[in-house]
Amino acid sequence: MKRVFYPLVAGLLLMSSAYMSVTSQEWKISDNHSIKFISKDPTGIFKDFKGTIKFDDKDLAGSKFDVSIDVSSISTGNGMMNKKAQIEEWFDAEKFPQIKYVSSKIEKSAKGYTVFGDLKIKGTSKPTKVNVVVTNAGDKAKFSGTFNVNRIDFKVGHKSETVPDVMKIEFDIPVTKK
């Protein structure tokens, strides 16, 4: 009986391991991240960026970005402009203190990955596709890329001759394995 039982158990374990799911690696966001917004005017950075990043190139279905930016961390290099960006007409930081991005799907692309998700600014959510390049070096990695945001779609400010509708967002997010 023992001769038949042990090979049977070993076979069942081997077969069940083929169906086990891979768990995506969770990454801790480093303090030296960079979230820039670029246009002819204004240009600046957001200093406070946090959230959860789960990413494994072998488990894209289990990978997820759930990140946010503190609106009050805006820095344009001009204190008065920073304060104005937080008023009701622009970001309305009192009512909507965070900008959020939550991914729904990640796909491999020619130059890295395409992350599909919802960007929420000032209470308005829009599907947003972000192209991401991942540089991985063992226990450290960096997620970087650029994408455009039409601020008018999110009711940030109003049409203006001086402030462009479309802002380029550039990011570098260094991370370490948790």
Image (cartoon, rainbow, N blue to C red):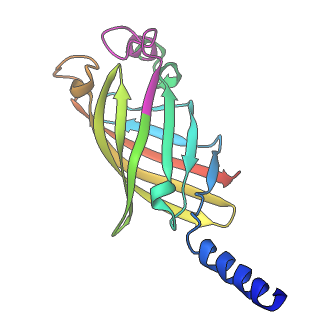
Secondary structure that dominates the magenta span: loop
Q: Position of residue 28 (x, y in %)?
A: 65, 46
Q: Position of residue 152 (x, y in %)?
A: 21, 25
Look at the picture and state if 142 lies above or below 94: below
Please report the residue visible at 51 percent of the width from the left and 18 percent of the height from the top. Answer: 72
Q: Is residue 58 left or right of residue 155?
A: right
Q: Quadrant of residue 113?
A: bottom left
Q: Nearer the viewer, residue 64 or 32?
A: 64
Q: Is residue 41 left or right of residue 60?
A: left
Give the total number of marks visible in the rendering.
Answer: 0
Please report the residue visible at 36 percent of the width from the left and 43 percent of the height from the top. Answer: 117
Please report the residue visible at 68 percent of the width from the left and 76 percent of the height from the top. Answer: 13
Q: Is residue 130 magenta?
A: no
Magenta-drawn segment:
82-100
Q: Nearer the viewer, residue 58 or 157?
A: 58
Q: Position of residue 106 (x, y in %)?
A: 40, 55
Look at the picture and state if 82 lies above or below 43: above
Image quadrant containing the N terminus? bottom right
Please report the residue visible at 67 percent of the width from the left and 83 percent of the height from the top. Answer: 11
Pick out the residue farthest to the front.
Answer: 1
Look at the picture and state if 143 lies above or below 47: below
Q: Nearer the viewer, residue 47 or 41?
A: 47
Q: Position of residue 177 (x, y in %)?
A: 68, 55
Look at the picture and state if 8 lies above or below 102: below
Q: Is residue 96 magenta?
A: yes
Pick out the residue farthest to the right.
Answer: 2
Q: Nearer the viewer, residue 57 or 86?
A: 57
